[in-house]
Image (cartoon, rainbow, N blue to C red):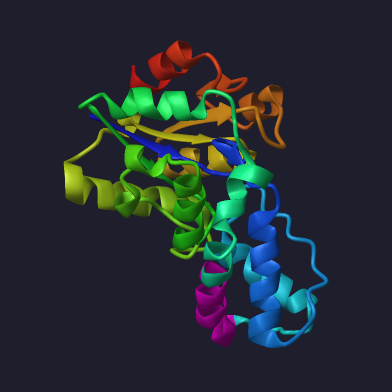
Amino acid sequence: MRLIQWDVDRTLLVGGGVGVEAYAAAFTAVTGIPWRGALVAAGRTDLSITPELFAQHGIDDAGPHLAPFFARYAEEFAGRAARMTTEGRLLPGAAQVLAALAGRPDVVQTLVTGNIAPVGIGKVAAFGLDPHLDTAVGGYGDDHPVRAELVRRSRDRAEAAHGRFADADVLVVGDTVHDVGAALAAGVVAVGVATGPASAAELTDAGAHHVLDDLSDVAHVVAVLAG
């Protein structure tokens, strides 16, 4: 059995700014402070990013605000999710690769994303990808601030639901050096996809075991991921 842990943004899809808009609206709704931040997420978790952004707005202790903020963020995103398909887009090959892998009984696909769970799942659902994924065993940005811990938590959940996976059969697929680093820290396989901020060379230098230019060569991608 193989466990494939997909990143979301810039690996499977581009959100067109919908998530950032929802994040900013939630911040102002919860704090009453006009949003003036720059949300640069690229491979980081919401639990890591959010305290920094609160501090930029003069709130040094974000702790008491996190639960209501994440709840409001989920609501704001849900109200905008339908716009994902018009303002964002799936990346080439993403839907076809997920569908092909979903047809294999020896593969479990899920998400490991820096997004909080409702937003990460909502993004893939907006494009109809969620039937291919066991999102209940994912790792999300409201689980832990450290991305490697999301990999571990997802694996624990997947093993509880599906049985044990060897280290060589757990694959983290993402577009940033943070995805690669998280996989390496968790002792599993790192697959870089050069559709985000990191080039193929940068993903290789970060230690990725496999590097793909994109997901458009469906047969090749499936062969790399499914073995």
Is residue 61 visible to us here? no
Camera-nearest residue between 30 and 175: 30
The correct choice, above or below, for 58 with respect to 19 in the image is below
**Is 59 left, or right, of 121 in this rendering?**
right
Secondary structure mostly seen in magenta is helix
Residue 26 horizontal/vertical position (percent): 64, 75
The correct choice, above or below, for 52 with respect to 126 in the image is below
Q: Residue at x 40, y 29 (%)?
A: 98
Q: How many labels were placed on the picture?
A: 0
- Give the quadrant of residue 180: top right
The question of residue 71 being in magenta is answered with yes
Quadrant for the C terminus in the image: top left
- Start-end of magenta stretch: 63-74
Q: Residue at x 42, y 45 (%)?
A: 111
Residue 76 horizontal/vertical position (percent): 58, 69
Residue 216 horizontal/vertical position (percent): 56, 18
Q: Residue at x 42, y 39 (%)?
A: 129
The question of residue 177 being in magenta is answered with no
**Is 105 left, or right, of 219 in this rendering?**
left
Is residue 32 visible to us here? yes
Camera-nearest residue between 35 and 143: 35
Q: Residue at x 73, y 60 (%)?
A: 39
Camera-nearest residue between 146 and 214: 214
Residue 112 horizontal/vertical position (percent): 45, 47
- Give the quadrant of residue 53: bottom right
Quadrant for the N terminus in the image: top left
